[in-house]
Amino acid sequence: MAWGEYPVGYNPNVHGPYDPARFYGKADTALANVKLGELGEWIGRRNMSLGGIAGGFSRGFWRWQHKYLQPKKVGIAPFVQVILGSMVFFYAINYGKMKQHRNVKYHW
């Protein structure tokens, strides 16, 4: 699949209008229904290429957007989620600088 093309499993006669939040490949067992012994096989069936990972993130973003940003009456939830996500991200990237400034009783 190249940029700007539909996924390989998409058929407009069968699926109707294209939805970027939907996976058009062969359906597989949901992660919640996978037994612990079958987890390795289940992970092996995932598409771990760069395009597969990017497609997964894209579908996840579209699902989040359809659920929280595109309804007629949008609440405060998507804005709070973005703010909290930004706080966690910036805390994680600045943790190395902040841990040097801890207030501790004994210094080395």
Image (cartoon, rainbow, N blue to C red):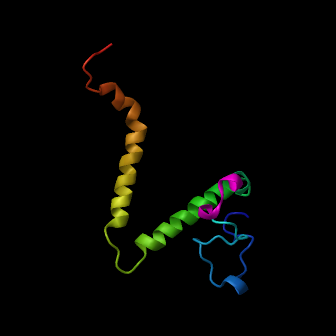
Residue sitting at x 74%, y 73%: 9
Question: Residue 72 occupies which quadrant of the picture?
Answer: bottom left
- Above/below status of 83 relative to 61: above
Q: Is residue 32 magenta?
A: yes
Q: Main secondary structure of the magenta part?
A: helix
Residue sitting at x 33%, y 60%: 80
Q: Nearest the camera: 108 or 5?
A: 108
Q: Quadrant of the C terminus?
A: top left
Which span is picked out in magenta?
Answer: 31-39
Q: Nearest the camera: 4 or 33?
A: 33
- Percent position (x, y) of residue 47? 71, 57
Relative to 46, is 32 on the left or the right? left
- Percent position (x, y) of residue 66? 47, 73
- Percent position (x, y) of residue 31? 61, 61
- Residue 48 seen in the figure: no
Q: Is residue 89 magenta?
A: no
